[in-house]
Amino acid sequence: MGKILEVSDLVTRFYTFDGVVHALSGVTFDLEEGETLGIVGESGSGKSVTMMSLLHLLPTPPAKIERGQAIYHGDVENGGAPVDLLQLDKAGIRDIRGGKIGFIFQDALSALNPVLTIGQQISETLIEHLGMTVAEAKKRSIELLEYVGIPEAERRFSSYPHQFSGGMRQRTMIAMAIACHPKIIIADEPTTALDVTVQAQIIELVQRLKKEMNISVIWITHDLGVVAGMADRVLVMYAGTPVEIAPVDELYYAPGHPYTIKLLGALPKIGEESHRLESIDGVPPDLHAEPRHCQFAWRCPYVQEKCWQEVPKQRELSPGHLTTCFFDFKNERALVS
């Protein structure tokens, strides 16, 4: 297995009437074939903007991708060459989006077209990307609805989004995302608006699809508990910057960045009723200012003089475990370089 996606130095800005918003500042990560990469961080950290930048889903203007690469390797095994998603024109990204990379949006009710039936919306994907006839697309759409657990799929094919429950709408979004057998699925907080039971069903469904279809998954969430149970690696983002990436077990048992430590400290722990949840003092930085030092310095209990002088670069703590912090937690000392 190798890398199916390599993102490096992605910089995205929004040019607004109030000034330039530095939404992403040098986002770098990769995705292995068949793995689940969890992306966590508080609201505004850049999780969704990163994925929408890759698929050209941001409105331009005000959004503008200033620099970076996003090399997609999904066609190499079929004789194709790697492609830079950020350099594709409209026709090129349309071929990738929905066909080779599926996207599950957070709010299915807003993502689905309210005036088209469920069947029409799934069929449209199959006709566009696979060249199916209307009859073939209908047959395949019904099979997909059955596959993701929609009861009475043939009858539901003609239903409208408002006639589905929240869980059924999300299952429909999953059916659309996997319709063309993509190499990657991006799930942007797909369980946020669902109750706990339905959340568990959706997570179980995505895990099953990943295994059966050998799909790589990028799972964006606020829920560190969900990530612990389903991700292979975790990317932690803060203020538009990746601050740590590590195998899931290592991240939870040996975090290497103060922000990650604070996030984990805010998790309730089973069997510790008297355990007081930690909070992170302060607020995230104003993204109108271009980063010139560590973005977490204002809120960090380990802050030192160097943190205010330069933006920390990624360094390796152990194989596959990268962090952007000057403090050495393993030896409990400040690094001088």
Image (cartoon, rainbow, N blue to C red):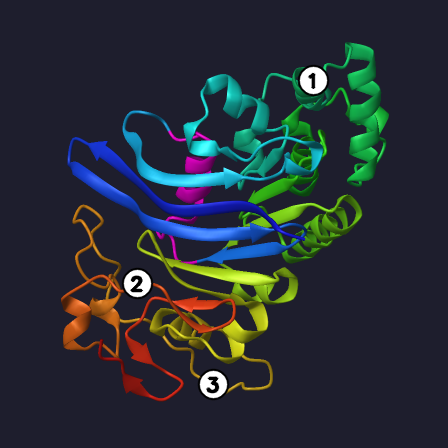
Mark 1, Cα crowd under 10 Å, few <14 / some 14-19 / many 20+, is some
Residue 20's spot in the image, x, y percent? 19, 38
The correct choice, above or below, for 250 with respect to 130 in the image is below
The correct choice, above or below, for 158 with respect to 58 in the image is above
Residue at label 3?
275
How far apart in space, not on screen, are marks 2 and 3 (Cα)?
34 Å
Residue 327's spot in the image, x, y percent? 30, 78
Q: Amino acid at mark 2?
A: Lys
Residue 155's spot in the image, x, y percent? 83, 24
Residue 290's spot in the image, x, y percent? 18, 49
Residue 16 is covered by the magenta coloring: no
Residue at label 2?
313
Q: Residue at x 20, y 32 (%)?
A: 16
Q: Amino acid at mark 1?
A: Gln
Circles 3 and 1 in contact, beta carbons < 8 Å: no
Labelled disc at residue 120: 1
